[in-house]
Amino acid sequence: MRPRTSHGSRFTRLTRLTRLALLAALPLAVACATLAESGRGDVALPSNLVGPFRALKRGQSCTGDVCTGVDELPASTLNGMIAAPSTPIARAGAALRLGTFDDLHLALYVARDVDVGAPATIVRMESSDARTFAAGDVTEAIRADQPWEGGAIGDPWVVRADGEVGLYYAVHPAQGAGGDPAQTPGLARARAGDAAGTTFTKDGALTLDGPKGAWETEPPRAPSVARDDDGTWHLFYGSGVAIGEATSKDGLHFTRVGLAPSLEPAPPGPATLPDGVKPPFDDRAVDDPCVERAVTETGRTIWRVLYTGLDLRGGSGIGYAARYGDSGPLSRNPASVFSTKLHARAPAYARFDSFALLFPTQDTSSNLVAYDPRKQGLGIAISPSRTFLPISE
Amino acid sequence: MRARTLAIALGSALALASLTPRRAQANPVETFGMGSRSTAMGNAVTADATDFSANYYNPAGLVGQKRLLIELGYVYAHHALQIDGKDNHVDDVRGLTVGLVAPGEVAKIPFAFGLGIHLPDSRVFRVRALDQQQPRWELYDNRAQRIVFAANLAVKPFPWLEVGGGLSFLAGTKATLDVTGDIDAGDPSHSNLRHQVDANLNSIRYPQFGVRVLASDKLRFGAVYRGQFHLDIDIDANVAARFVGVPLTSAITTSEVDAFLPQQVALGASWDPLDDLTVDFDVTWVDWSAYQPAVTRVTADTKLITDDPALYGLIPAKAAPTVVVPPGLHDRFVPRVGVEWRRPLGDKDRGHRLSLRAGYSYEHTPIPDQRGVTNYVDADRHALSAGLGLSMHHLIDELPGDVRFDVHGQLSILPERTTLKDDPADLIGDYRQRGRIYSLGATLGVAF
């Protein structure tokens, strides 16, 4: 029989060895306990939230119990279109956010065809999810009931300032001012005293002083207005094939900024392009400015303008131009930020905390060979394009 | 001794089998170090590494190891990298480290074979190629997500000189995807497609060489060269299908550099001002100007075989070629310093020892201001490290050599950097980037 001490010593040595082995096995156990996962690294990336935009999808496909894709729109809608009342929509104009952070509650102001022909009313459409607009949520904002409006108004734009909502709009020359384009006031304003922008009182036509540039071949249209830090109103408007700018201290009496437009069509590209390279999307005209003044993450003032780009081949898309500071011409991004075969144009824009929504006016069918006022609708698209909205009920 | 001879023979065979080295690799060791002792000393060990980490820092140091050494460790690094104050969730890096140093003698010339492996436990490697406009943490996002396998040989032809070199291994990808069948444009779920995949993971080898000069008992110098490497991923996709009843063919080729490590030269010195104190200095030149970013280049040639002009414009025949903007990185010198203080534990004759370590390195970002369309996000990096080592000699009869246990922690501080875009119509716009990287690790070694 071995002495107890010897037996105990051997036992102790074995225990030590076991402990060392267990210590060595620890990292192996840790490694085995971890599971592989999808790589990330692209969360919360910076973006100006002005594109590229992706049309919202109604693309969920189910086989049995297995569904793939996403369903961001109600089943009653067309892909990439909001659910709107059936009366034809002539043109989107502006979005007014009614919530905070990423709350989707908003109102859209839309020029609407009462019948086939020129729009005569601007309506306010309210939605809690930015995608479904019931008939009961549509109210008339203003009607073309003044003699100087000639029964034809459109191109709405709304801006919140000093607790009011200003509604800028165009008076179309075809019918306005008795049908004389030279006498049409072009642009006008109404104001609502409530922050939700429901009941408007008309202020009258805007004045636009200062010498015209040669580019301004038509009465101004498609107004878009924002105010800078010193209270100056900046008006961007379309005319001819370009976009111009004017400023004002009271938001009603404007003076043109120089003789040159702020944004012109892109110069036409070379006659032959390399394989796969597309000509500019806006080499025929730019129109329908949608302006936003902001401060970048680094403290620089920036004016961002989304606009309609028309090309020489009959297509259109939404473009983006911008400038640093409160004056100067706009620099255009060469690529369209939203383009489909549905002739997207006249962007309305709503910026939320982490994403932005675009509401362009567009055809409801890609088979249209010519403009059909009865087949127009409001599209909806999102930026950043990898952001997905929750399912709309 | 038999095991030692076997290990040396294996190392020699590996070296002979790999006589056509290619280029070096972007890897987690490059960013977070190898082995707890070396990492704790700020990676400033070109003249001082003799454990398995010498497989990366300087293969010549392997022959400085006197005993057969087997090491096993684990490293974990957490990125807290932010743009505009929002965490971008750059993937953590974690994995096992395994190493071997087998010394011996051939014709009375000291000789050693070394093996170093970093084995990630979440993914062996990650392929991630992005549009060049998409912001990404270029040096941290994907480059460290891969396996490292290095084998080296070292000899000591003179008492004052050690020379070593070896190879690291990785796989490049060349794949072909063939798709045939019918595409239902109206309802994709009714499409009927068949596909075949033929992929090859081709072996890529890249070299490193090092020397160590033992100037005296208290002073050592080291130099190492690590070769350039880029990991290419090429995928060809061929589609032959019917689209709305019309035959369609499409050939799509994507080509990208998934990972790139520039060549570099490191010079180091290691000095023992006191018997129990070692101070290490390193400076590394990195050829960042040769850097190639991981940007996808796509070409597509699609053809609808039809006489119907209405269908011509339905699918673009060719995709616009990708024009990669040169990243324009700058070469950099990276200084590093490390210190180790050793203290006997208990009775000095027993050979137990406690070591305290600290280190620092500064990497001035090689990426220029991103004023144009690219968004390779990066910032300067200050890396502060510290560690503790416990070495116990002849702990039990079964282990007559040393048992070593080292731990380390590293804090990398990336101070704020501001990116201002020249073009106000840039879709990304201005941003600020900054961050922290926290790294922890432990290594257990047994010297027989």
Image (cartoon, coloured by chain):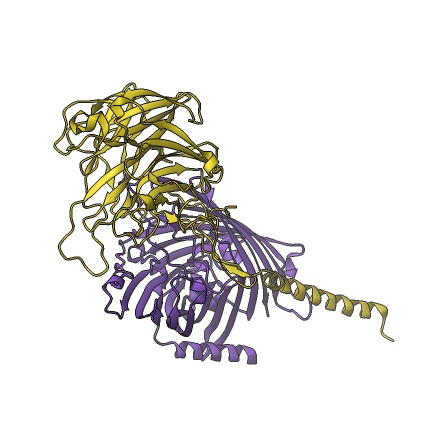
Give x and y (percent) for residue A86.
41, 42
Q: Residue at x 13, y 30 (%)?
A: A213
Q: Is residue B237 visible?
A: no
Q: Position of residue A157 (x, y in %)?
A: 33, 31
The chain displayed purple equals: B
Farthest front residue? Answer: A115
**Nearer to us in this view, B144 or A212:** A212
Number of numbered discs: 0
Closer to the camera, B331 or A202? A202
Q: Reply above or below: A357 against B55.
A: above
Considering only vertical position in the picture, is A264 above or below B443? above
Give percent across and percent down for residue A182: 16, 27
Q: Is residue B313 left or right of residue B32?
A: left
Q: Is residue B237 above or below residue B367?
A: below
Q: State the image coordinates of residue A323 (x, y, percent, origin top left).
A: 26, 35
In front here: B87 or B269? B87
Residue B2 seen from this side: yes
Left or right, B416 with respect to B321, comes to right
- Quadrant the N terminus of chain B occupies: bottom right
Choose top left, top right, bottom left or bottom right for residue A227.
top left
- Give me the chain that's yellow: A
**Residue A17: quarter of image:** bottom right
Q: Quadrant of the C terminus of chain B?
A: bottom right
Front-lying residue, A287 or A226: A287
